[in-house]
Amino acid sequence: MSSRLLQNFKGGRAIVVTRRGGWESTLETTLAKLGVSTEYPEIIDGRAQIDVTSLQADRDILFVDGDLEGAVAIEVHPASRLPPVPVIGLVGVEAPSRLKALVNLGATSFLRKPVHGGAVYTSLFMGINQFLLRAEMSERLQDLEERRRGRRAVIRAVVLLMQQGGLDEEGAYSQLRRESMRARQNMELYCEEFLSKRAKPPDTSGRTTGIMLQGGNKQAI
């Protein structure tokens, strides 16, 4: 996993969901010094007016006031449990229910209210980098899971060639590898397609499509 951490937040946009009360000026001023602009979405009937589809993970940071129950509704990714952009929880009342609500939104960092300028950079650093690290970990886990499922297809394809092509294990694997390279596909994908073709219904003669054997000869299955 990459150990590179983001330290410069210039060009970022903070979307702060809160009711203006004067304390947020410290947050806004400190963010400006870090090169991060600040926007305050309008809150109508207790719900922040945010166009979630326009949020960009490489630019936007969502600050959510935990004292505003239900002000933000965003979906987290089912696998990574992450929101579309980094979320930093603004904590006033430290009630378990409010902290839980922020965690459920995918908050990866917290910032106490009233905000002190010296705490903003640390909170921003933790929130963004934890978001990036979790997203990277989730992608790697998904990739490993896909490869794990793909290895089953490789084993089945090797066994099929051994049974139908009269090859030993090494010969069957080598042939599949050569064919996948020729098709410019990774081994797992090639074997999945290989097995899918073998599973097609028989033709009018009662035989399925032949499989390619060493030397270019085909044998009906």
Image: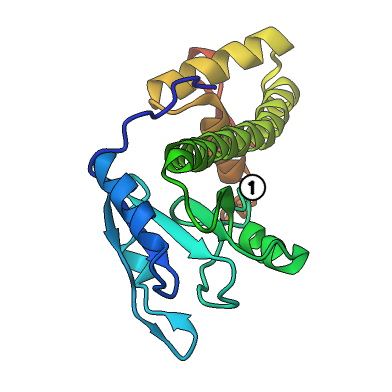
Q: Which residue is nearer to you in this view: 175 or 106? A: 106
Residue 136 visible within the image: yes
How are the residues colored? Answer: rainbow
The amino acid on which the numbered mark 1 sits, given as a three-letter code, is Ala
Residue 18 sits above or below residue 157 on the image:
below
Q: Is residue 196 left or right of residue 14?
A: right
Residue 72 sits above or below residue 165 on the image:
below
Q: Is residue 171 left or right of residue 118?
A: right
Residue 78 sits above or below residue 171 on the image:
below
Task: Please identify the residue farthest to the bottom as the structure is shown.
Answer: 45
Q: Which residue is nearer to you in this view: 160 or 75? A: 75
**Label 1 neighbour load within 10 Å: few <14, some 14-19, many 20+:** few
Picture coordinates of residue 60 (x, y %)?
A: 34, 53
Kindly identify the residue that appears in the image at 60 percent across and 77 percent down.
Answer: 69
Q: Which residue is nearer to you in this view: 193 or 10? A: 10
Picture coordinates of residue 24 (x, y %)?
A: 39, 61
Picture coordinates of residue 177 (x, y %)?
A: 53, 17
Kindly identify the residue that appears in the image at 46 percent across and 41 percent down.
Answer: 128
Label 1 belongs to which residue?
A: 199
In the rendered image, which quarter is residue 118 located in? top left
